[in-house]
Amino acid sequence: MIKNFEKYLASGLLFGAVLMMSVVSFSCKSKDKAETPKDDKVVADSIAEDSIAEDTSLKIADCDFMYFRGNKFCFFSMERMDSIVYEGETDEIVNYSFVPGTLSMYYSVCKDSSLVLKFIDFAEEVPTPKHIANWGMTCDDCITETYGTYSPLSVSDDGRYLGVNYDFSWDGYWFTKIKVYDNESRKFVTSQNQEKLYDYFNHSSDDEEEISSIIFFEDNHNYDSDDEELPQAHNYYCEQKGKGKVCLTDKLTFDETPEEYYSGMVSPTADRVVFGAVTGWGDFPHGPYCIASLDGKYQMILDGTDLSYDEGPSMAWLEDGTFLYIVNFMEGVDDFKPAIMAIYPDSTKPVELFKVSEFIMLPKISHEE
């Protein structure tokens, strides 16, 4: 049986949370990514050269995901293969999260070494950053000592409560505290203990019901603890109602035999799945993410990905079955730059879109008048 990831990592590093970044949870930014934007406007951004066009008919609401160029919010459309850039923020953006189901976003910036909470609604004709509150802590209070990245910004389902982690501890490789801002009373919540503060951000989910007809499991071999040799063929399977058991890893060649697998996320078209394979341990589990068709005919290790990455890798399924993910590293390449890769539903070959180290899927917005 698949082991529970929670017993290995502290809250905030769960594999399920990584995969669900297509909703709201992709939030950490490295502290060395800031650059000064040129002016306060929304412009077009070409993929190849990052050049700026004067006019564009592309709208933010029609885009699929957001990424960053320094302090610029960038929005990309897979249909148009084009992006637009909002340059109206001048401070270093350190974490962010959309209010579920809207293009309204809360985010924190580092201003004069202090962490400041802001708000922007990208559905407005002229989006304008608004100051909400000073978090009352320095930017360094919210940086992990593992990868030097900022802690995430949490938003409750109703958008009322905002939370940011601080006080990093090596005991759990995560932050020990969370500070919560009540957007209704315009005050920080101070009367409750840490456990109750975290309860504001327990998101409801129906994902299990969506894939309940598909079961994933490992071939845990039975052996005595005194056996000198551990099982060499450790595979991952799926079983769909009425279709029987299918192996998803027998065509893959790993550097080390996986010790276990992390249950993944099935595509909207219900024909592929992405999952993690643990091939070794350090302070964190290590090993690549993999993708496979549920009939077992197509299997691939996603090179340049690793389970230990604090910031991802970002990954998401699009409604048409296209899979997006970040390549974070490449062995033996000194000047490597992270990039967004796409695997289209009619292809088994990853295609590079452009160089960027993270992305977040935009909430799906109703266009009803």
Image: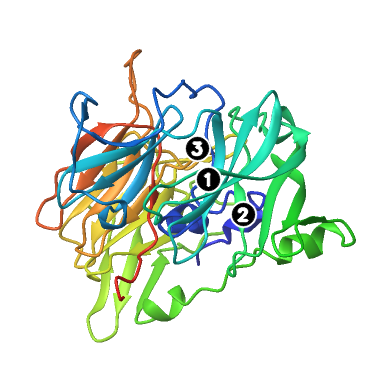
Mark 3–mark 2 distance (CA, rounded to whole Å):
19 Å
Amino acid type, callout 3: Tyr
Instruction: Indicate which disc residue 309 carries.
Output: 3
Q: Residue at x 49, y 64 (%)?
A: 100
Question: In the image, residue 221 lies at what x, y percent?
Answer: 45, 62
Q: Residue 323: horizontal and vertical position, in percent?
A: 26, 53
Judge whether 356 appears above or below 96 on screen: above
Q: Which label number is shown at residue 27?
A: 1
Instruction: Look at 75% across and 57% down and name the residue there.
Output: 186
Q: Secondary structure at mark 3?
A: loop
Q: In terms of image quadrants, where is residue 279?
A: top left
Q: Are marks 3 and 2 in contact (CB under 8 Å)?
A: no
Label 2: state its secondary structure.
strand
Q: Earlier in the sequence, mark 2 or mark 1?
A: 1
Q: Residue furthest top?
A: 334
Crowding at dot 1, Cα within 10 Å, few <14 / some 14-19 / many 20+, comes out as many
Mark 2 crowd level (few <14, some 14–19, many ≥20, 10 Å Cα)? many
Left or right of 82 on screen, residue 368: right
The kind of residue on which mark 2 rests is Ser
**Res. 252 in view:** no
Amino acid, disc 1: Ser
In the image, farthest residue toward the left: 346
The picture places residue 90, in percent across and down from the top left corner, at 51, 28
349 or 295: which is nearer to us?
349
For marks 1 and 3, the one nearer the N-term is: 1
The image's colouring method is rainbow
How far apart are the two marked residues, 1 and 3, measured between alpha carbons? Answer: 13 Å
| Residue 225 vertical position relative to residue 334 in the rendered view, above or below | below
Residue 55 at x, y percent in the picture: 18, 38
Which residue position holds label 2?
Answer: 154
Q: Are marks 2 and 1 in contact (CB under 8 Å)?
A: yes
